[in-house]
Image: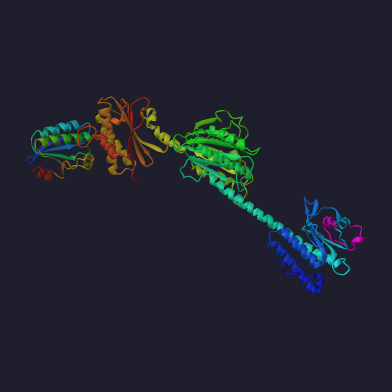
Amino acid sequence: MKHEIREEQGALVVAFNGDIDLQSSPEARQVLLEAVGKNMPILVDLSGVGYIDSSGVASLVESFQTARKGAQNLVLVSVSDGAKRVLQLARLDKVFTICDSLDDGIAAVG
Amino acid sequence: MNDTPIPKASETASSESQVFDHLELLSQMGQDFVSTRDLQSSLVRAVQHITDYVGAEGGALFMLEDEDTMLECQACVGVTEITGLRLPSDQGIVGRSVQEDAPEIIRDAQNDPRFYKGVDKQTGFTTLSILCAPMSVKGERIGAIELINKKSGDGLFDDSDLHLLRAMSASAALAIHNARMAEALVEQERLARELELAAEIQRSLLPSEPEDDFPVFGINFPARTVSGDFFDFFELPDGRICFNLGDVSGKGMNAALLMAKTASLYRCLGKTIEHPGKLLALINEEVCETAARGMFVTMVGGIYDPKTGIVLMANAGHEPPLLHSASGEFSELPAEAPPLGISTMLVDEDGYPEEEFDLEGGALYIFTDGVTEGYKKDGSELGAEGVKEILSKHQKDQIKVRLNTIAGKIARSGEALRDDLTLIGIDGAAAQVAKKAAGQSENMNADIGEGGGEGQVLGAETMSSLRILSQPNRLKLVRELVAETANLAGCCMEDTRDLVIAVDEALQNVIRHAYGGAPDGDIVITMERQKEDLVIYVRDHAPTIDPSNVKPRDLDDIRPGGLGTHFIREVMDDVEFLPPPKDGGNVLRMVKRIKQ
């Protein structure tokens, strides 16, 4: 799994590329928590993530909860069908704000 | 009809009208015999008619009795009552007439040496003239009609009277013969009806035809209407199947009755007594106590467990059941105890000896000698070899097809059977499949634990198997293997995705919880196609866990751990930990039904 962080229109875009599984989720968790620490709205771009497991979902949840504490917005962008299925199984598809594109995401956090 | 005035020959004017009246008399007599079931009174009326018609003072009808050694007067009219009089069938005028099947006339009795004057002396009657004509049909002697003293003229008969009597006695003979035949026919029909009722009751003692996939099947074709053979099978409350087959010595009604008794006893006792040997001993006592002398029953009784394929069986003197192994070999299981109904002394206290064996996917056949000794179409006996040949040829067919094929070789429509034809078969194939599936966890040790992946379930295909170390970086490889395998097995995209999730989460649990993060544990993943199911086994050698502790966690409390188990249960159709293998570790079995 690789990741890329960039700022776009006042928001922090965290883009993952590759599977987020037991192997990679500790890294994903660290990346996300560090991003949340920057105190900006966060767009988690999952367009390059074909697979995410329960540990990856847990990392998302943890960073989402941390962001909420600091009244930060954290939205998911371009979620693949595979990742959506996992979120749905975890009953989290209604908890997260899921946007179809980066533009929608920026609008959502703006 | 009795009121119809009978014209008298002596009173008729012309020979033409005499013939007409004569025919009418015969026709009336015939009808009288047919229309009444009371032969005796028909005989009396016939004698009356003939006596009046010929114009005699008296008449008597004698019939042969006691295997034709005696003649007995069955009907009598006139001055002397001799009904019931019995004479040796070779004596006197009547006797001679019957023996020679020829009419007799003694025109002047008082001056004829052939006449025995004893009767006259007893009765005070004076016999002037005697006519006697035999009654016979197609050489079968029935008796004779004798007339005494002509009323008109000089009281003596002449040849024309003899002709007349001869014609009428022949008609009477035919009427009696027909009446007897009719009576016999009625009796025969009554017996046939009773026999058919008995057969119906007997058929009701046989079990009704089971579902096609039921492992036990039986056939009974009686050689006659009723049968001395029987078979039965029924399910016990725990799912085991109680079965039996028996053959009563002899045939016919007495054998059928003993069959009904034995079969009923077995069905009744079989529901509570779970040891066939003990059960046979009880039935033996009952049959010994009450059965007719010389009758006995050979019988095999047993219990089959379709879950394990194990048969518990006892044999009371029946011909050896045939075991046909899954690999095609035949072996016989001879009886070690005498038939039922011979003696209670010959049976051990514990009952008849029992034997227990595993069908191991093979089949057990029990039959009566009507099967092996039955005639084939070409007239030769089917024989034990013939039976084996059919069973080998049809080994893969349903048990029902196998038995029907055997029966079809012997029982042909429109042809009588040589003997009752009865056979029962127990098919262990289904049990073997079930047992293999249940025993999978144990087999995993040897086969999958060594990295192999032999299919353990009949008809199952091991599609993929992978042995990995308990390290997270192995998971991507597993996911790809699962996806490819599911795809190959025909799963749709969504199901494939779900299968990947389930296996991935299962492996995570093993790596994180079972092995506690240790990187040197081994995990074997095996994917099998079992008919419409994709079955996945995840085998580890970590300390055995208590499955009751593995629970999906509450979704409101979203934190790592537990969520994966929830995913697995959500996407798989069946998830279970199999009983712990002997050498430790755990086997998780997950099943996904493949949608068509």
Say if residue B273 shows up in the picture. Answer: yes
In the rendering, at what x and y percent does residue A6 appear? 10, 37
The image quarter in which residue A18 lies = top left
Q: Could you tell me which residue is drawn at 33 percent across and 45 percent down?
A: B595
In the foreground, B550 or B188: B188
Give coordinates of residue B215: x percent, y percent: 48, 40
The answer to whether residue B368 shows anywhere in this view is no
Residue for point 27% across, 40% down: B497
Please identify the residue farthest to the front as the structure is shown.
B124
Asked if the stretch drawn in magenta spans residue B1, the answer is no
| Image coords of residue B552 (percent x, y) | 26, 35
Q: Which residues are magenta?
A: B93-116
In the current view of this chain or complex, which residue is farthest to the bottom?
A: B13
Q: Position of residue B391 (x, y in %)?
A: 54, 40
Query: On the image, which quarter does residue B227 sit in?
Result: top right
Nearest the camera: B325 or B250?
B250
Residue beneath the point at 56% across and 34% down: B282
Up-down relation of residue A49 to residue B123 (above or below): above
- Whether residue B111 is in magenta: the answer is yes
